[in-house]
Amino acid sequence: MPAYLHFPLSDQMSYKYFWRPIVPMLTAAVLISPVHAAGKRPLAFREKMQPMTRPGHADDNPTAVDRIRKTAPGAFLNSAEIPQSQVELLAKDTYEKSRGYRLNKIIRGNMDRKEIALTFDDGPHEGYTLKLLQILKQTHTPATFFVVGKQVEKFPTLVQLEVIEGHEVGDHTYDHVNLNELTPEMVEYEIDQCDRAIKRVTGSSVRFFRPPGGNYNKTVLSAASRRGYITALWTDDPGDWARIPGDVILQRSLDRLENGAILLLHDGIQETLDILPQLISEARARGYKFVTLSQLAMNRDKKDIEPMIVGKTKKF
Ligand SMILES: [Zn+2]
């Protein structure tokens, strides 16, 4: 009989003789097994094990926003958007045309038609968008809203109302960032997430895209073109984003009214709401007609229409 069996059974099962050698082995096995098993699981299953997030919602899924913050902290324009001036935009447009670049964008409508497109960026905003819609409804004025994806998710019914009341909705990125600061991958993410948010609440895709601050480069225009979007800029920026007095916004807007104008205004600015009825009635008194961007684009002179380029834009 082996020597250890001479001990009483209780001693054989004691911690000293039985458990002490086994416990470290059992502990190691317990710790290693999930790691080992996870490594062999199919990817889809491993992904399901991640915490649940609502796709595209920045507050619940901070990864994308954090990535932008880390890689391009200057990309965020939330409080200090300074749009490119009309002079800058026109100079860029003239340069691009002189070099023969075809970029699928709209900077103005037909200069022979007394038509104006009102555009409101950065919404929707609780407390402002409804009032804005009310003014547009009372004055029978169509407009185009360039909405921010994360705002669309916060206030989906406001975007639905914009569509129901006959206005047009365009893509203004998900996080409202300076796209020139981002990698091509992040540019596409910003455009697509906004479009998805709009599609989820309105059921349809957008036709127009406006880069925040009017900041665009080849990567931005290529990404928009590949998706079939027309990049929309403006002829007139009265600067309501700088919270200037309402009468200054009104005067600047009226001073620069011209055929085929695209007026850049913002949703969420009280001063803009205050002067909007007067701006609309004064423009009408001067013979201008308000149209959506689609109508303005459709009525363009043939020579101003840039053909749709998919994935092919010359370097500039
Ligand atoms: Zn903006």
Image (spheres, rainbow, N blue to C red):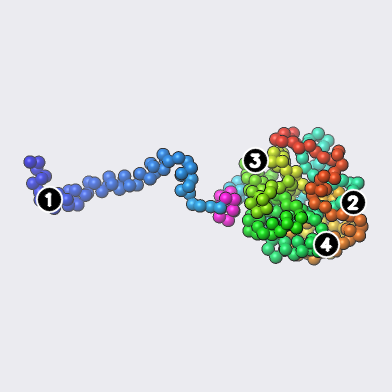
Q: Residues within 10 Å of mark 3 (few under 14, many from 20)?
A: some
Q: In the rendered structure, are the residues bearing label 4 and label 3 in contact, judged by CB atoms less than 8 Å apart?
A: no
The image quarter containing residue 93 is top right
82 to the left or right of 291: left
When asked about the image quadrant of residue 150, the answer is: bottom right
Q: Earlier in the sequence, mark 3 or mark 1?
A: 1
Say which residue label 3 marks. 184
Q: Quadrant of the N terminus?
A: top left
Q: Report the Cα–Cα distance between label 3 and label 1.
A: 72 Å
Can you identify the residue that label 1 sits on?
9
* Marks 1 and 4 close (CB-CB < 8 Å): no
In the rendered image, which residue does mark 2 sit on? 114
| The residue stretch that appears in magenta | 55-64
Asked whether residue 237 is in view, the answer is: no
Marks 1 and 2, how far apart at CA: 104 Å
Residue 130 locus on image (x, y percent) = 72, 63
- Please name the amino acid that badge 1 sits on: Leu
Is 174 placed left or right of 104 in the picture?
left
- Closer to viewer: mark 1 or mark 2: 2
Position of the C terminus by quadrant: top right
Cα–Cα gap, marks 1 and 4: 96 Å
Q: Nearer the viewer, mark 4 or mark 3?
A: 4
Magenta: main secondary structure: loop
State the CA–CA distance, disc 4 to disc 2: 18 Å
Q: Amino acid at mark 3?
A: Pro
What residue is shown with label 4? 139
